[in-house]
Amino acid sequence: MSVILSYIPKWSIFGQALLLIAVPILIMSFFGWLRKEIISSFALKPNKSFSSVKENDEPKSKPLTGQYDADLASVRDAIGQNSDVRFREFKISGTRIRAAIVYVDGLLDADHVDTHLITPLMMHGIPDQEWDNITHSSTSFQQYMTTQLLPVNEVNETKDLLELTETVLTGRTALLIEGIESAFLVSSPQGKSRNVEEPLSEALLRGPRIGFTERLGDNTGLLRLHGKNESLILSKFEVGNRVKKELVLAYMRDIADQTLIDEVTSRIQKIDIDDPLESGYIEQLIEDDVLSPFQQLQNTERPDRVIASLLEGRVAILLDGTPFALILPATFGMLLQSPEDYYERWIPGSFVRILRFLAALLALLAPALYISFISFHPGLIPTKLALSIIETRQGVPFPSIIEALIMELSIEILREAGIRLPKPIGPAMGIVGGLIIGDAAVNAGIVSPFLVIVVAVTAISSFTIPVYSAGITLRILRFVGMIIASILGIFGVVMFFLLICSHLVKLKSFGVPYLSPMVPYTLDDWKDFLVRLPLKVMKKRPHMLKPNDPDRRN
């Protein structure tokens, strides 16, 4: 930049100012055009040949015939090659009618199958006097089976072989009976799962010490337990093309905006993926801007955080197989808030929240400011401090950007290693490794002691962010700011910060501005933004969510 400015006559101050303004605008325009081109590339038209092949490959429906041997053979041909699928054939006591149950070992409680299915049918069966009263029509026999011989809470019937096999593979038990043209689908308790424990990814200081588990039924039960309200709606969806998984959309019927619910429902129904292994897949498939480094949905393991968000007018997504729920729409302020802010009195809660905002700025800009001041603007530093820094940098063979990158990359590697290592040695390795590397680097003259302080403050500041994913975003952008600062100095740091602000202003999460209530400005919503005012003052729900019931106290 300084070389370019040297070609402009010294008297042309307006030319220099114009260039300083035009260059960032051109860069922003270029990246905006590139972003539109990349997004448009995702909107590909469906391949007709692929669609036709996919439709032809789908298994066709086949009805059950009521012939025991043929129906059982069809089920064996469909899923019998799986080693975990169990077939148990027997005769119903008191009759000569053959029957068979089909289930997947490990997906349900085998003792429950023995107690509530096999025992009533094989041991008790149908008494002679009852059998005489039953007509030989299949309808009457089916009714007797469901009302007298199957002591379970849910029994469905199907005549479709494809539906039967899919249901069995998802954890239910199928009962085939000779002479009946339909199969009974019986619900059974699922197999072993992890107990409800304290959330691992969110440290608790105060509040309920329970977190979601990998079982969707447990998670919806926790929501019901914490949100005892008849307006809590849990809508179920099925996602995944090859591996089917249940997904639940949770919201408060009389609070959440119907437009938001319809938009989320539409995006969920458009999900096209073989297997959504974790809620992170859902997050990436339904977010607004896939190129933004900022997360547009909040993930959490805490039921109390989910319920609090639902009462504000947001919606939540829970996926079977993961303890992480998604809350949307998300804003930047949400990522720096914690449920403990509301459990404590408003003065300490507000102080800690402001501290987090300041720590986020330090985590983002501290190394970049150090590089710009040391390399370009040492005159802006107080004289005594500047002399002290210059003295500590004597003998350092690298420029400030190189030594900063060495230390920051070392800290990031240590942090990642500490996460992947077993819990007993992970934290200890991170602390000891940081101390050893920092001290060795200073003694070797590779970095200056002042930089070690800056890097340590930056790392500690990033730990104050309650949401881990938000911390990752600031860590990535920190390196971008360091590189820009090494080229343009303090001017580059300012432009870098303005670029981030301009992106955040344009970013939206399901129609809600990402920087709200700051932009657009909403006075009522500022009661729970930078500071958290007393609960008696917070009588309105966030205006930005457009809730059906804006009053918190009815």
Image: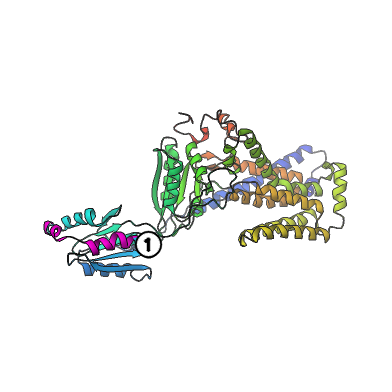
Viewer-side residue, 73 vs 350: 350
| Side of 504 where 148 appears, left or right | left
Locate residue 228, reporting x and y percent: 42, 39
Locate residue 109, reporting x and y percent: 37, 61
| Side of 185 where 140 appears, left or right | left
Give the magenta range: 112-133
Quadrant showing the C terminus: top left
Quarter of the view holding residue 401: bottom right
Viewer-side residue, 120 vs 212: 120
Q: Residue at x 39, y 46 (%)?
A: 235
| Above or below: residue 153 compared with residue 255 | below
Asked if one can make out residue 261 in the rendered structure from this viewpoint, the answer is yes
Amino acid residing under circle 1: Lys
* Mark 1, residue position: 54
| Above or below: residue 3 compared with residue 118 | above
Q: Is residue 127 magenta?
A: yes
Locate residue 423, reporting x and y percent: 61, 59
Q: Residue at x 60, y 46 (%)?
A: 466
Quarter of the view holding residue 95: bottom left
| Side of 232 where 303 appears, left or right | right
Magenta residues, dominant SS class = helix
Asked if one can make out residue 62 in the rendered structure from this viewpoint, the answer is no
Tell me how many marks there are.
Answer: 1
Q: How is the image coloured?
A: rainbow
Q: Is residue 321 magenta?
A: no
Locate residue 209, reporting x and y percent: 53, 47
Mark 1 surroundings within 10 Å by alpha-carbon count, few (fewer than 14), some (14 through 19), many (20 or more): few
Q: Secondary structure at mark 1?
A: helix
Q: Residue at x 62, y 52 (%)?
A: 472
Viewer-side residue, 469 vs 16: 469
